[in-house]
Amino acid sequence: MRRTAPATLLALILAGSLPAAALEGPAPAAPGTTAPAASGKPRVVIVATGGTIAGAGADAANSATYQAAKVPVDKLIAAVPAIAGVAEVRGEQAFQIASESFTNAQLIQLAKQVSALVKRDDVDGVVVTHGTDTVEETAYFLDLVVKTDKPIVMVASMRPSTAISADGALNLLDAVVVAGARDARAKGVLLTMNDEIQAGRDSTKRVNIKPSAFFSQWGPLGMVVEGKTYWFRAPVKRHGTTSEFDIDTIDALPDVAIVYGSGNMHPEPYTTAVAGGAKAIIHAGTGNGSVAGYLVDTLKDLRQKGVQIIRSSRVGDGFVLRNAEQPDDKYDWVVAHDLNPQKAKILAAVALTKTQDSKELQRIFWEY
Ligand code: ASP
């Protein structure tokens, strides 16, 4: 039989007239625990929250000057006809906001919506479109609290849909491929950007001006190329069905504040945060989560008043070692392990819904 050239196949897939299964290798397939769709394609729900992926600029030259959260989910889907070739897709509009405006209320509402979707027999995977600014926080939150092995895939873009070389269309197509892929199951919440599949727990926004914006210090889990998934590693931290947290039992999150470390600090950012209601402080310390000598008494005092002190680092990579730089055992403080301050804030808030015990909190920071 004569074989069609791969480039021709890809063109047909992108036009929406051929399923990605036309390419060689393991194709996305309907996961086994639910009855397959008549079409044989996985059924994916796209939950839209806004962000640049739904952004629109005045001109195609506007890659950085535009309004986020403008394009509704059905238009996002219609703009990528190739999606119909890889999955049966429908959209739900959760919110239409820029992600810097997310609050705990939105996190909880979104997680409950996604949790309800993954419980359905007719849903094989969920994609969440999101702004890039806080997608790393939402990804980690869903990873911790949605009890499922079905793929949940975050997707965003750095350029609005109206820009030249907009990155959202391919990112969205890739996210749908991953959400429908049997081999994406039980890998935690994922983020598909710039051809890479990253662990939602690990990935963080590192660049604020170009499409290769997301980075994980432990490396991406895999890649999506021409409608197929390729995997190279798997997460070991607890998530999804192995998590002890469940959004179905969480209706509010306690306040957690981050205080950014630098030279020449003052105690007020810590004390003011606590006066404003913070139950835990993420100290985004210099280096190995270091605390300036002149601030130690302030933090010890706050701990005595019941506030959890969690040492993270402003450095970004590496991990904070317990009892190095500061005697955490003696002061009853916690270390954030390899979580950056914004991820540590999410885990602290979730953990504090279950325990106020600092030893338990430290166990949770080791395990998640
Ligand atoms: N400020 C936007 C947001 O996070 C940026 C983006 O989506 O890239 O919603």
Image (cartoon, rainbow, N blue to C red):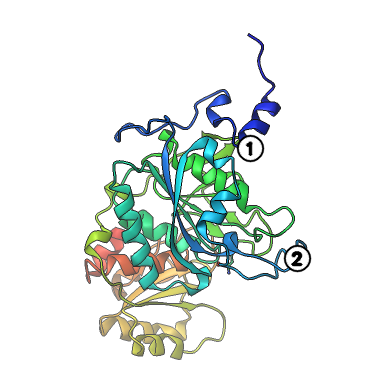
Q: Is residue 232 visible?
A: no
Q: Nearer the viewer, residue 315 or 14?
A: 14
Q: Report the residue at 57% width, 23% height from top.
A: 24
**Label 1 belongs to which residue?**
14
Amino acid at dot 2: Asp
Farthest right residue? 61
From the viewer's perspective, tell me whether residue 8 is left or right of residue 107. right
Q: Report the residue at 65% width, 15% height from top.
A: 3
Q: Nearer the viewer, residue 72 or 54?
A: 72
Q: Quadrant of the N terminus?
A: top right
CA distance for labels 2 and 1: 25 Å
Amino acid at dot 1: Leu
Q: Report the residue at 31% width, 79% height from top.
A: 279
Quarter for ligand 1? Answer: bottom right
Q: Quadrant of residue 107?
A: bottom left
Tag 1 or tag 2, which sits nearer the N-term?
1
- Label placed on residue 59: 2
